[in-house]
């Protein structure tokens, strides 16, 4: 019998068993439900389809984590959109340019904020070496990349994690808690953040959280706090 999901041959023990494993069954059912949700709607306008597994969604950014892939890598490898037109219009109205002072990306959607990168560059200028340092604007040559490409280091455990700032030699992470996602009315998923942090700590990583408002009020003190965390 061939698995409905992965095409692997397996011994069918029950007549209604069409999958080689429980994960394959769950993936297949999840994809089926995603297709049913968008019946009668228009591809690319109302939803997009994952070129890897056929999953349907308004946006694939979260789904691609299951494939250990970033949206940039997906677009490069498959030349397919990662979000439908309606989703992009909705998000653009919420998180772009002056309408979103917490992120302020000059009209471009981005996974990182300018103010976080400002802090990370101030920290980096005071470090003796950038050999094992990773953050969004620091490219592979340890130079500044202002194209908007995300160079955050990829840590893979049971899920893909991209720390805001990482010293990989010491397994130390600085997480920048911006107002937009982590403020009083923050839009972030607290449960997901807690799971993410628990995974990192179990993996031996130490984490320092920096609040955006604290950095704005006391930039020099915050930079010093980060340096003490990284060097002691």
Image (cartoon, rainbow, N blue to C red):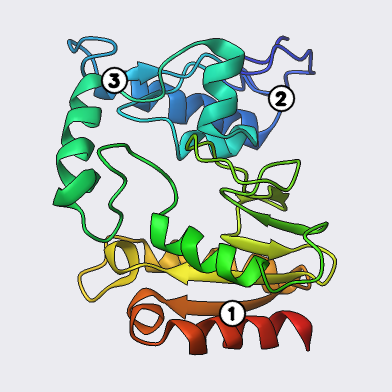
Q: Please determine whether, in this image, residue 224 is positioned above or below residue 20.
A: below
Is tag 1's residue or tag 3's residue first in the polypeptide sequence?
Answer: 3
| Disc 1 crowd, CA 10 A, few/some/many (<14, 14-19, 20+) | some
Q: Position of residue 43 (x, y in %)?
A: 28, 10
Q: Does residue 194 appear in this view?
A: no
**Quick one: SS at disc 3?**
loop
Q: Depth-wise, is mark 1 or mark 2 nearer the camera?
A: 1
Of residue 87 and residue 23, the one placed in the foreground of this image is 87
- Tell me which numbered mark, 3 or 2, is placed earlier along the sequence: 2
The number of discs equals 3
User: Do the residues bearing badges 1 and 2 touch, measured as CB atoms within 8 Å?
Assistant: no
For the residue labelled by badge 1, is the local secondary structure a helix, a strand or a loop? Answer: strand
Give above or below for 49 relative to 29. Answer: above
The answer to which quarter of the image holds residue 215 is bottom left
Residues marked 3 and 2 touching at CB (< 8 Å): no
With respect to residue 16, does 59 lie above or below? below
Query: Which label number is shown at residue 47?
Result: 3
* Mark 3 Cα shell of 10 Å, populated few (<14), some (14-19), many (≥20): many
Q: Residues within 10 Å of mark 2 (few under 14, many from 20)?
A: many
Which one is earlier in the sequence, the residue at label 1 or at label 2? 2
Q: Nearer the viewer, mark 1 or mark 3?
A: 1
3D distance between C-alphas at marks 3 and 2:
29 Å
Would you name the residue on which mark 1 appears? 208
The residue located at (62%, 32%) in the rendering is 67
In this orientation, which residue lies closer to the viewer: 22 or 178? 178
Q: Residue at x 69, y 31 (%)?
A: 21
Could you tell me how far apart the alpha carbons at marks 1 and 2 are, in whole angstroms?
A: 43 Å
CA distance separating discs 1 and 3: 37 Å
Residue 8 appears in the figure: yes
Label 2, secondary structure: give it.
loop
- Specify the label residue 20 is tagged with: 2
């Amino acid at each position: 019998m061939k698995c409905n999901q992965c095409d692997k041959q397996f011994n069918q023990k029950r007549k209604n068993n069409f999958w080689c494993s429980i994960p394959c069954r769950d993936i297949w059912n999840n994809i089926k439900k995603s297709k049913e949700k968008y019946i009668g709607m228009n591809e690319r306008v109302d939803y997009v389809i994952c070129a890897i597994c056929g999953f349907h969604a308004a946006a694939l950014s979260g789904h691609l984590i299951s494939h250990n892939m970033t949206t940039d890598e997906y677009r490069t490898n498959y030349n397919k959109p990662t979000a439908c037109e309606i989703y992009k219009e909705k998000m653009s109205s919420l998180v772009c340019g002056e309408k979103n002072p917490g992120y302020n990306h000059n009209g471009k959607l981005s996974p990182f904020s300018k103010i976080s990168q400002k802090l990370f560059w101030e920290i980096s200028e005071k470090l003796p070496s950038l050999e094992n340092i990773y953050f969004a604007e620091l490219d592979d040559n340890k130079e500044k990349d202002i194209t908007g490409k995300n160079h955050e280091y990829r840590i893979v455990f049971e899920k893909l994690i991209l720390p805001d700032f990482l010293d990989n030699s010491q397994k130390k992470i600085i997480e920048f808690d911006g107002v937009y996602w982590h403020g009083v009315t923050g839009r972030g998923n607290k449960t997901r953040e807690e799971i993410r942090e628990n995974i990192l700590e179990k993996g031996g990583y130490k984490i320092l959280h920096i609040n955006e408002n604290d950095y704005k009020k006391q930039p020099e003190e915050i930079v010093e706090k980060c340096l003490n965390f990284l060097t002691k």
